[in-house]
Image (cartoon, rainbow, N blue to C red):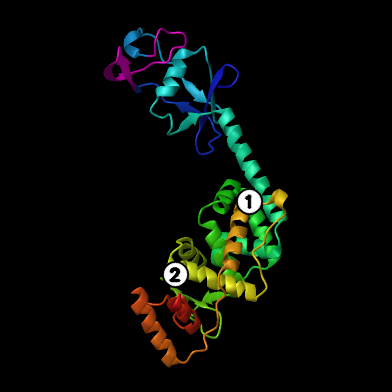
Amino acid sequence: MIQNQTVYKLKNGNKGNWELPIKETFINRVVDEEDLGGRKIKYVKGAKSIWADDLPDHLASQKVWFSKGFLFIPNSDKNLLEIAKNHSYNGIHYNLFDKKSLALKELAALKAKDEIISLISNSDQEKIIATAMAVFNTQAFDWDLPTCELELRKYAEKNPTKLLSELNSKTYESKYISALAFGKGIVRYKLGKTSIVWNDTTEGEILKLARGENGVEKLGELLSKRTDESEVLLQAISHKLDAKAMSLPKKEESIESEKDKEIAELKKQLSESQKLKSDNSTDFILEDLQKKYKEKFDKKVPNVYKNNADWIQEKITE
């Protein structure tokens, strides 16, 4: 409702002139709570009703046009208001134009854009790269820093609320850590992208992938489950990140987002976790330890640690 007018707008960005069908149009009529079914209508400005049955036959229905995509109806024109509201095309070809709602929607998008640009502007190189990988997945693997920042800014320009929603999603934290693991060379795809493996001499398998599955997304999903296996995997990634002298990025407290705080807290928890040791055991000792682990816990050693004799020994003696 705008200055004593009710405004309807054509959908799908249609900005042309369009006639609202009224002749031979039927609208459901209810009288005293009794549903009379579909009844033929007429639009005669100032007439006593919109129903053809109530009006003289000689009165012709007036035409109603949308002009440049809009239909402006004075609030004093009760007949046209009733027709536009109850017409079967309402919601299909046109919608009520609520200027306040549109302003709020546009404002939210601008605020989201400002927030994202601030996050990008105040992030270090590692976070920009990891964020691009978390958002754009494998297509960002070969991007350099300027390309990552450019694509994030372009995406924020076109889809600010969508990007902000992604950054605030429950799985973003895990996808972010997954992207860091890929970006820092902690993990990599096995040839053929059939699985994710540790990027070291062991090439231990972390997660199998179906054809076409995205590694960053699938590893992020696994990390987000907080199972025994995922906790072990988080510890391993943290250990390897620490070995590379790389910490999860943070911004100044005044501009730090809630998501950054969550990531920082996770980093702190991971850093306090027990450091993992390398596996120097012989095959004989390893096989024996695996058997004892299964006897004690009634399950096999998690895949990521099945070849780590020191870790198995420690779990057994706990």
Q: Note whether 289 is above or below 194 in the view shown.
A: below
- Please indicate whether residue 37 sits to the left or right of residue 84 in the image: left
Q: Earlier in the sequence, mark 1 or mark 2?
A: 1
Give the residue type at disc 2: Glu
Q: Position of residue 215 (x, y in %)?
A: 49, 69
Report if residue 154 is visible in the image: yes
Q: Where is residue 211 in the image (x, y as percent from the top left)?
A: 42, 71
Q: Residue 101's x, y, as percent?
A: 56, 31
Residue 176 is tagged as none
- Kindly indicate the quadrant of the structure image that contains residue 34: top left
Above or below: residue 52 compared with residue 65: above
Q: Position of 304 compared to 108: left or right? A: left
The quadrant of the rendering that contains the C terminus is: bottom left
Residue depicted at 70% across the width and 56% down the height: 251
Q: Which amino acid does label 1 sit on?
A: Ala
Who's the residue at 56% across and 34% down the image?
A: 15
Q: Is residue 229 magenta?
A: no
| Quarter of image, res 58 | top left
> Would you say residue 28 sits in the magenta stretch?
yes
Residue that mark 1 sits on = 156
Residue denoted by label 2: 229
Residue occupying the point 43% across, 71% down: 209
Q: CA gap, disc 1 to disc 2?
A: 35 Å
Q: What stretch is highlighted in magenta?
A: 27-50
Could you say where residue 213 lies in the image, as x and y percent from the top left? 45, 67
Asked if 273 appears above or below 52 in the picture, the reply is below
How many numbered circles are shown?
Answer: 2
